[in-house]
Every structure is written in structure tokens, then in C-alpha cells.
Image (spheres, rainbow, N blue to C red):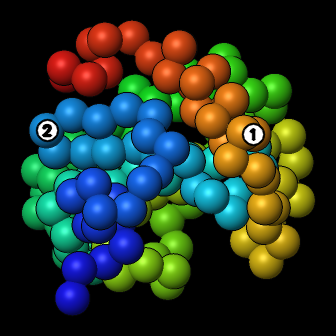
Amino acid sequence: MASIFTKIVNGEIPAYKIAENEDFLAFLDVNPCAPGHTLVIPKKEVDSIFDLSDELYLGLMAFAKRIEPAIRQSVPCKRVAVAVIGLEVPHAHVHLIPISSLADMDFTKKNSPTPQQLTAVASRIQANIPLSVLNG
């Protein structure tokens, strides 16, 4: 059975997309730890990040690295943290979370922003992504 992320990739479930290319997709977490919390996934469904081929793993991390500056420019924070947990959805993914303190990465206290808030954050981040991110 396809994961919720595969359904997002296939357009069966809507998402607040940030960027995508042929192999990867970045979109907002709808229950974020902090505003701008972005998930970066390979479009190919693989359960664990450590089950990815080396090529896909390195590509995923490179794509996440290219998304990070747009998040940092769009959401007030000291850093954009990276987390790989892998329990929530059986589809490899990386969390990019704008943080100003460790408390901003508390996965037990997620927020429930409105669709309007998610759309506004996604638009700000998208505006700061250079075209080279999508083509590279």
C-alpha cells in the first residue's frame, strides 16, 4: 500500500509544496514543530533512509541542502535543523525545522496551523528558492 507521501507525490493528496524536481519533493509538514517545518522526500518510496541507494541518499541530502537557505531567509530562526526519525511514515524523509532553541524541535508538541498560515509560509519559502534548485 502506498504511503501518504507517495500519495502526495502522485497528486492523490494535496500538499503545501515548496520545491520539486524529477527525483525529490519538499513540502510543509501540516503539523509542524515550528513554522516552516519542511519535509524532503525522494519520490521513490523506500521505507528507511538507510535503505536508499547511495545515489538517492546523497541526492536527497543535496536537495535538502539547497532548500535550507530559502527556509532560513523566509522564517525567523537561528538555524534550520535537520532530523531523520523515520517512525511517522514508512517513506524515507528528512525534516528541515527552523529553530531558535532546542525546544523548537519537540516532536511531541506539534502545532496545527490554518491552511492560510501554511499557504503564506509556503509562498514565502517558494519565493526564495532559485530555479537552479529545481534543475540541479
Nearest the viewer among 12 and 90 is: 12
| Discs 2/1, front | 1
- What distance separates the C-alpha of mark 2 from that of mark 1? 28 Å
Q: Position of residue 10 (x, y in %)?
A: 21, 58
Q: Position of residue 69 (x, y in %)?
A: 55, 22
Image quarter hosting the C terminus: top left
Residue 3 placement, left or right of 83: left
Q: Position of residue 58 (x, y in %)?
A: 23, 47
Characterize the local packing of mark 2: few (<14), some (14-19) or many (20 or more) Cα atoms within 10 angstroms. Answer: few
Task: Place residue 77 in its image quadrant.
Answer: top right
Residue position marked by numbered label 2 in the rendering: 22
Question: What residue is shown at x 81% (from left), y 61% (from top)?
Answer: 111
- Residue type at the position of mark 2: Glu
Image: 126 above or below 33: above
Asked if residue 82 shows in the view, the reply is no
Among all residues in the image, which is located at the extreme bottom?
1
Residue position marked by numbered label 1 in the rendering: 117
Asked if residue 94 shows in the view, the reply is yes
Image quarter hosting the N terminus: bottom left
Residue 56 placement, left or right of 33: left
Secondary structure under the numbered disc 2 in the rendered image:
loop
